Amino acid sequence: MKGNYFITSESVGAGHPDKVCDQISDSVLDAVLKDDPMGRVACETFVTMGLVIVGGEITTKTYIDVPKLVRGLLEDIGYTHQKYGFDGRTCSILNAINAQSPDISQGVDAGGAGDQGIMYGYATDETKEYMPLPITLAHKLVKRVEEVRKSNELKYLGPDCKSQVTVEYDNGQPTRVDAVVLACQHTEDILDKTGKKITTKARNEIIDVIAQPIVGKLIDKKTKFFVNETGKFVVGGPQSDTGMTGRKIIVDTYGGVVPHGGGAFSGKDPTKVDRSAAYMARYISKNIVAAGLAKKCLIQLSYAIGYPEPLSIFVDTFGTGTVSEQILVQLIRKNFDLTPKGIITKLDLRKPVFRKTAAYGHFGRNEFTWEKTDMASILKKGV
């Protein structure tokens, strides 16, 4: 886009009910892959007041102690006391896991995709992470909330939190932060005399300790801050909202600046192209931008269940490409194996690394194989 415009993205912390479910589902996946790299997992989690339900389809040679795994994770997140509305040590846990359908399994065994659908990948050079700035800042804000809570710098914070950032752009370049929204669960210690809202002191602390270190350089006199705008956030986590796996697909990806295929990631083993092909699309788009072949790159892949090759490859560089999209499609077909087996091998997806992805975004974090730019020089030479 040209001219002046605003883009907003949100993120949620590890203690948000939906993110709790994503982390449980991915922890189950990791536990399977640790002992059985070829295990098949489609794990869904539901959480509400005092109850966790873990279900789905899993086919594996190993054994997973689901209640023990769930309680350990909840404790790590911070749900260890009723003052936060949820205690992982005393909540009820229901295990409702079955085996994968043999009708699906026979197609996957033959090397086909584990599902049909469309998957998107995106990269932009507007940040060092090759990610859109709004979602990058939103993730950093909720990560900062976790850091100051666990370090006891702000002792009154609870595990649940959300952030939202509005960035102003001028002719495609981010120039400033227009608005920051923070919702941070807290104990009653920081309520004012009315008991209906947090004190001004606490509000200013949250801005100074959490927001300023993350967005400080992009703040100006017009920047607006919205902190616990309802007044207070004592009741949070599963006590206040039910959570489910796969409900934060925009938080997990690019913050809404590009389309999404609709398929969630967490709890799915890499034969499910909802996850693995989305990772591959990100990997390819990032390498195209890193190679200097475009400033922005969107890739769409599509698959049919049981069939290995993608049905289509679509590339859009939004007018920033140094070569045509048709040439980029040719480069992709020549240099990347886009079958499920090829993707799993290239990105080394049989390892238990997925719980880490389940909070603070799946992209823009160099700890993951799909964030490497090792193909950039090859793509550049190919042109």
Image (cartoon, rainbow, N blue to C red):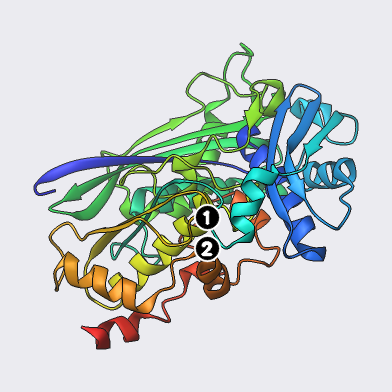
**Closest to the observer, 252 or 328:** 328
Residue 111, placed above or below residue 84? below
Q: Residue at x 57, y 69 (%)?
A: 367
The C terminus is located in which quarter? bottom left
Lateral position of residue 365 relative to residue 100, left or right: left
Q: In the image, what residue type sits under mark 1?
A: Ala
Q: Give residue 16's quadrant in the image.
A: top right
Q: Residue at x 64, y 35 (%)?
A: 160
The picture places residue 57, in percent across and down from the top left corner, at 72, 41
Residue that label 2 marks: 340
Q: Give residue 322's quadrant in the image.
A: bottom left
**Closest to the observer, 267 or 360:** 267
Residue that label 1 marks: 113
Lateral position of residue 109 relative to residue 9, left or right: right
* Farthest residue, direction left: 3
Dot 2: element: helix
Q: In the image, what residue type sits under mark 2?
A: Pro
* CB within 8 Å, label 1 to label 2: yes
The picture places residue 163, in percent across and down from the top left corner, at 48, 38
The picture places residue 238, in percent across and down from the top left corner, at 70, 26
